Image (cartoon, rainbow, N blue to C red):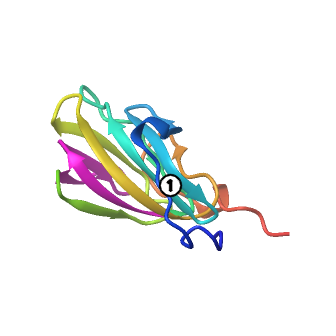
Amino acid sequence: MRKDIFSKIDYVTADKLEQGPITPGQNRLKAFASEGLWVGQCHVTALDAPSQWHHHANYESVMYMLSGRIRVDHGPNGEKSFEIGAGDYAFFPRGMIHRAQILEGGDEVRYVFVRLGSGESVVNVDGPGFADPATYLPKEN
């Protein structure tokens, strides 16, 4: 992680957020990113159908729901799920394939997240299952 990332006060206004990786049904905006850290927000748009399956590769993610309510599907065959709404938190381990769908809140479902790790922060995949680390971790020399 950059040594100076926590050495001074920094801020990003809403109009300065940058486009982050997109999963169909989830549009992300980046606030801060450095080696080992990725912070941003997500606007969930998966109203009529779930978002695409995806994982966060070599990142562990903590999510805090700002508004609305979603169902998160996960598990080896996508058979597990939980619901999370405004004020709730969730933790996603590295490589955990999942997807989300809006249950309440219409077009105003949003959450913020903090990711710790490295590499690509979002990997979209075709379906549920196990994300093999060999497919997303950097190769050692």
Q: Position of residue 120 (x, y in %)?
A: 61, 52
Q: Which residues make up the magenta segment?
A: 60-85
Q: Position of residue 100 (x, y in %)?
A: 31, 43
The image shows residue 126, relative to residue 113, as above or below, that is above
Observer-nearest residue: 136 or 120?
120
Q: Amino acid at mark 1?
A: His
Residue at image coords 48%, 58%: 130
Q: Quadrant of residue 104?
A: top left
In the rendered view of the protein, which quadrant contains the N terminus? bottom right
Q: Secondary structure at mark 1?
A: loop
Residue at image coords 36%, 36%: 51
Observer-nearest residue: 123 or 6?
6
Q: Position of residue 9 (x, y in %)?
A: 49, 65
Q: Which residue is mark 1?
A: 56
Residue at image coords 35%, 52%: 112
Observer-nearest residue: 8 or 71?
8
In the rendered view of the protein, which quadrant contains the C terminus? bottom right
